[in-house]
Structure formats: C-alpha cells, structure tokens
Image (spheres, rainbow, N blue to C red):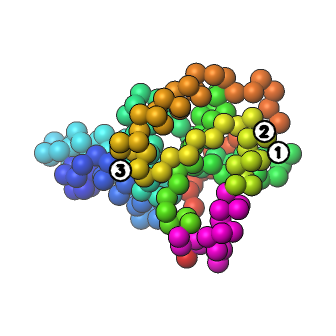
Amino acid sequence: MDSAREWPLADAVVAADAALLAGRTTNAELQRVLDTVRHWPGAARAVRAIGLADGRAESPLETRGRLRIVGAGFPSPELQVEIRVAGRLVAVVDAWFDEAAVAVEFDGRVKYSDPWRGRTPERVLREEKRREDELRALDVRVVRIADADLDAGWPPVEARLRALLAAPGPAVRSFSATPRARGVRRAG
C-alpha cells in the first residue's frame, strides 16, 4: 500500500494491477488496507490508485494505456473482452468500448520479440493480422496503441479514438462481446 501512497499514480496502478493479476492480493484486501491507512499521509493518492486498479490488465502498457484513455476524458473501457461468433472465439481484445464496437489493442514489444506458448515472432504477427482482419470483417473498429503513443504520439491516437467512439457500432451484430472475469498471466 505504501507504493499507492508514495509512487506516481501510473506506477502505483501498474503495481496494483500486477498484484491483482498474479493473485497476490484481492480488491477486498486492498479496500481493507485502505480503511486502515485512511488518515496516513498520501492516503488520498492510495484511494485514487486502488480505485483505478483492475486485475484484468495483463501488462504495464495495458495499465498505462487505460489510464491515458481515462485521463483524456473517455469512459473506462472493459478489459479482456472475448469476441465470439456463433460460440467460436475470434479474439480477446485488451480493451473494449461496447456501444461503438471499438477494440483497443496495446502493442508492446515483448509480444513480438519474446512471444509465449512457443510461437515465433513471425507467427505472432501473422496471427495478429488474421485476427484483426476477422474483427474488421465483423464491423469492429480496432485502434492499436504502442508505448510511444502514450506520450508525444498521443494526440492523433486520441483524435482517432474520439472519432470512432462518436459513431455507433453496427446496428445488427453478428458477434457477442463478453468481458472476462480475470486476466491471464503470460508465461514464456
């Protein structure tokens, strides 16, 4: 909890998200600790950080990206949403805006440079392309956000996201979108 009281907001939320994802703590435990430290210096910062924590975020980039989105005045997206067609899993998107049918994918380098499940970087890239093509065929709009987009590259990403969210998604959907209850820890 000291990290949530003392660290910069983004760092504290990254740490809380990682702890929740790893099962090292629960939201209920974090709330109990907040009750204990409510009068300590930095308690208001801790309340804010824990209020933003979500154990479904699967990487620091996903956490920082979500914070950037919310900080820009957008609603908080659902995380780790399964997109299915006739029961078949098409994709699990990192973040999802349901009304507009907009998926946000956070593209970190590790996904391509050190893929998990024994895949090669080339295979990961092909799978990502096929998956995105299939999403677009369902009238799901996709925004990809990389680390560099969260700083100087943010204004065009924000403008694109704002434009996409201003338009409703398809009136008739051939897919379902269901948030997962938990994120998935990645292992080499």
Comparing 12 with 136, the one in front is 136
Tell me whether circle 2 and circle 1 mark residues in contact (CB < 8 Å): yes
The x and y percentages for residue 94 are 57, 49
Asked whether 101 falls inside the magenta stretch, the response is no
> What's under tag 3, amino acid-wise?
Val
Helix, strand or loop at mark 1: strand
Magenta stretch?
Answer: 113-128
Helix, strand or loop at mark 2: loop
> On the rendered structure, is 26 left or right of 181?
left
Question: Where 120 sits versus 92, above or below?
Answer: below
Q: Earlier in the sequence, mark 1 or mark 3?
A: 3
> On the rendered structure, is 17 left or right of 84?
left
Q: Tell me the CA gap for discs 2 and 3.
A: 33 Å
Residue wearing tag 1: 85
Q: Which mark is residue 13?
A: 3
Residue wearing tag 2: 138
x 22%, y 39%: residue: 44
Q: Which mark is residue 105?
A: none
Q: Which one is closest to the eye, mark 2 or mark 1?
A: 2
Choose top left, top right, bottom left or bottom right for residue 46: top left
The x and y percentages for residue 6 are 19, 51
> What's under tag 2, amino acid-wise?
Leu
> On the rendered structure, is 77 left or right of 150?
right
Comparing 174 with 132, the one in front is 132
Question: Where 83 sits versus 156, above or below?
Answer: below
x 56%, y 56%: residue: 183
